[in-house]
Amino acid sequence: AQKITQTQPGMFVQEKEAVTLDCTYDTSDPSYGLFWYKQPSSGEMIFLIYQGSYDQQNATEGRYSLNFQKARKSANLVISASQLGDSAMYFCAMREGITGANSKLTFGKGITLSVRP
Amino acid sequence: GAVVSQHPSWVICKSGTSVKIECRSLDFQATTMFWYRQFPKQSLMLMATSNEGSKATYEQGVEKDKFLINHASLTLSTLTVTSAHPEDSSFYICSARDESGKAPDTQYFGPGTRLTVL
């Protein structure tokens, strides 16, 4: 089974509207971390937001928030007030187990978001 | 903060030559760096984990003799693609783990290197 699942093939949103990008994960480890990265066409991977499995509140970073539903094993990214510059590929990733020097990230396949003017 | 640079940003080489790619953490020290490969419109594939002062840990299926990794200091890791062939053409991207951040497993990525082997 895939550890990170991103099934939306491509998303479109009107400028200034909010959009939700879906991510579900699969792990039996009680300790894990969830990450979202943005990759514009230039190729760089930009860290957006982090959610720890023991965090009581949903993470927020500016226009980004993470809708963390632990029982459903979902960690959806919500982008509010979309901007044209938000058009990019978005990857969800997970680190399993406690933090450590060799903690690896498992990435989903990504979702393409296009913001329409 | 947490800036990672990568050099070169693109390289074209002839088949059979070796290419070295550098990854530097500019404003933090990174005991651990990671090397990924990405094909067009696909996700990142982890190639190896690079630890300062020790041998890299390669993922299954990645040839360690072909992809040489050296992590000589807390701010620099290098990936050398030896005897490159056209099938090695890809986008290579490195990341560095910032252990001082509030999310200590957060990996910060370099801008990537596009390798084309003719």
Image (spheres, rainbow, N blue to C red):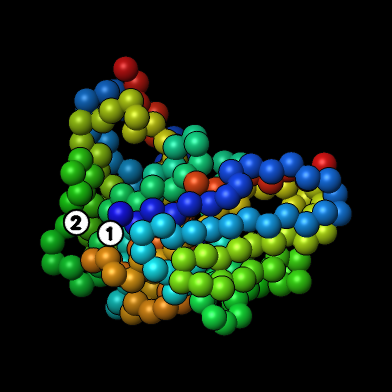
Q: Residue furthest top?
A: A117
Tell me how many marks there are: 2
The amino acid type found where label 2 is placed reads Ala
Look at mark 1 in the image and give the residue it sits on.
Answer: A50
Same subunit, labels 1 and 2: the answer reads yes
Question: Could you tell me which chain the residue with mark 2 belongs to?
Answer: A
Horizontal side, residue A17 vs residue A108: left or right:
left
Any part of residue A32 in sight: yes
Q: Position of residue A63 (x, y in %)?
A: 20, 40
Horizontal side, residue B51 vs residue B86: left or right:
left
- How many angstroms separate mark 1 from mark 2 (CA)? 7 Å
**Label 1, residues with CA under 10 Å away: few <14, some 14-19, many ≥20:** many
What's the residue at 60%, 63% (across, down)?
Answer: B78
Q: Residue furthest right?
A: B16
What's the residue at 58%, 57% (across, down)?
Answer: B22
Question: Could you tell me which chain the residue with mark 1 belongs to?
Answer: A
Helix, strand or loop at disc 2?
loop
What's the residue at 38%, 53% (across, down)?
Answer: B3
Look at mark 2 in the image and give the residue it sits on.
Answer: A59
Question: Mark 1 touching mark 2, by CB under 8 A?
Answer: yes
The amino acid type found where label 1 is placed reads Tyr
**Label 2, residues with CA under 10 Å away: few <14, some 14-19, many ≥20:** some
Name the one closer to the observer, B94 or B6. B6
Residue B35 in the image: above or below residue A44: below
Residue B118 in the image: above or below residue B22: above
Name the one closer to the observer, A17 or B93. B93
